[in-house]
Image (cartoon, rainbow, N blue to C red):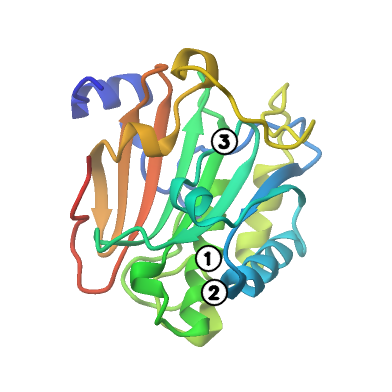
């Protein structure tokens, strides 16, 4: 992959499109819809010990929002969870021992030429989270899924807004709050003229290169860091097919950067 410079990112995407706007929407990132809500297909690639957190996170995000999920695939094999490959029009949620690389949670979104999300993954790193409390695991799971919808953080300073989108250890911050739900309602009541979520069928393997199949977050790497506050970090990478990947990173406790960003 060619080296990506900060200047090229700013020129192509706009510097304002990298951090959260007022109201904690993650820039303008969202799935394109016709204004009647987001019907997002989901691929379940979590192990049994994460299943309760995964199931409740999806249910909590559906409650009081125009978001609905349709599970179109389930594969919790070790290899699939470790690869956590994104699928067009879908969100995949995974956990695995991704190594002591500095991040505990990672949300990755891929954008089309209009800047709309076309696929995304939410990854939980068991290398750090396997021994964490249930409350904190719920917090990370709920937050990474929230990023894939297009939400940013309510804070990064450790203060609690009693939402999983803050950066606190408050037991009351395991799930979304009413403000998160109001914001999602606003985001997905807008008509973009087309839809990027695609539930037309189960995940199908694509045999071919990036021009045929599109790039995958795991293939393009983490790219370069464009923003950080506390243990929250955003990185941007350009895939071999020319599309952009945006990574929202939850750094593990005790880390101020990721260890391996290739």
Few, some or many residues within 10 Å of mark 3 (<14, 14–19, 20+): many
Q: Position of residue 101 (x, y in %)?
A: 24, 58
The quadrant holding residue 27 is top left
Q: Could you give the CA–CA distance between mark 3 and mark 1, rounded to whole angstroms?
A: 17 Å
- Say which quadrant the N terminus sits in: top left
Residue identifier under label 2 = 138
Give the image location of residue 226, x and y in percent: 25, 41
Near-viewer residue (193 or 67): 67
Name the one closer to the observer, 22 or 146: 146
Which residue corresponds to the image point at 53% horizontal and 38% vertical from the top-left?
A: 86
Report the residue marked by disc 1. Answer: 141
Place residue 105 in its image quadrant.
Answer: bottom left
Name the image quarter holding the C terminus: top left
How far separated are the C-alphas under marks 2 and 3? Answer: 22 Å
Q: Is residue 256 left or right of residue 66?
A: left
Report crowding for label 2: few under 14, some 14 to 19, many 20 or more residues within 10 A (C-alpha): many
What residue is at 69 percent from the left and 67 percent from the top?
Answer: 55
Instruction: Give me the residue at 20% from left, 24% from top.
Output: 7
Q: Residue at x 32, y 47 (%)?
A: 234
Mark sitting earlier along the chain (2/3): 3
| Tags 2 and 3 touching, CB below 8 Å | no
Q: CA distance from mark 2 to mark 1?
A: 5 Å
Q: Is residue 38 above or below residue 182?
A: above
Give the secondary structure at mark 3.
strand
Q: Position of residue 45 (x, y in %)?
A: 59, 55
Q: Is residue 213 left or right of residue 154?
A: right
Q: Is residue 176 visible?
A: no
Q: Secondary structure at mark 2?
A: helix
Q: Quadrant of residue 49?
A: bottom right
Of the numbered discs in the image, which one, if any, rests on residue 254? none
On the question of residue 123 being in view, the answer is: yes
Q: Which residue is mark 3?
A: 119
């Amino acid at each position: 992959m060619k080296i990506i410079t900060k200047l090229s990112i700013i020129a192509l995407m706009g510097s304002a499109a990298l951090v959260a706007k007022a109201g904690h929407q993650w820039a303008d990132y969202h799935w394109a819809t016709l204004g009647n809500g987001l019907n997002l297909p989901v691929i379940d690639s979590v192990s049994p010990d994460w299943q309760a957190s995964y199931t409740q996170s999806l249910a909590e995000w559906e409650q009081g929002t125009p978001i609905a999920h349709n599970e179109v695939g389930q594969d919790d094999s070790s290899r699939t969870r470790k690869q956590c490959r994104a699928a067009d029009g879908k969100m995949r949620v995974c956990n695995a021992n991704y190594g002591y690389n500095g991040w505990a949670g990672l949300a990755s979104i891929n954008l089309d030429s209009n800047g709309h999300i076309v696929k995304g993954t939410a990854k939980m790193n068991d290398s750090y989270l396997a021994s964490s409390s249930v409350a904190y695991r719920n917090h990370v799971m709920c937050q990474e899924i929230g990023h894939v919808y297009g939400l940013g953080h309510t804070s990064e300073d450790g203060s609690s807004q009693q939402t999983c989108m803050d950066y606190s250890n408050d037991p009351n911050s395991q799930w979304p709050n009413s403000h998160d739900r109001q914001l999602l309602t606003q985001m997905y009541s807008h008509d973009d003229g087309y839809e990027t979520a695609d539930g037309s069928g189960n995940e199908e393997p694509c045999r071919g290169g990036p021009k045929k199949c599109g790039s995958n977050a795991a293939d393009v790497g983490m790219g370069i860091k464009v923003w950080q506050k506390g243990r929250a970090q955003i990185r941007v990478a350009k895939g071999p097919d020319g599309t952009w990947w945006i990574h929202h990173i939850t750094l593990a406790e005790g880390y101020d950067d990721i260890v391996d960003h290739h």
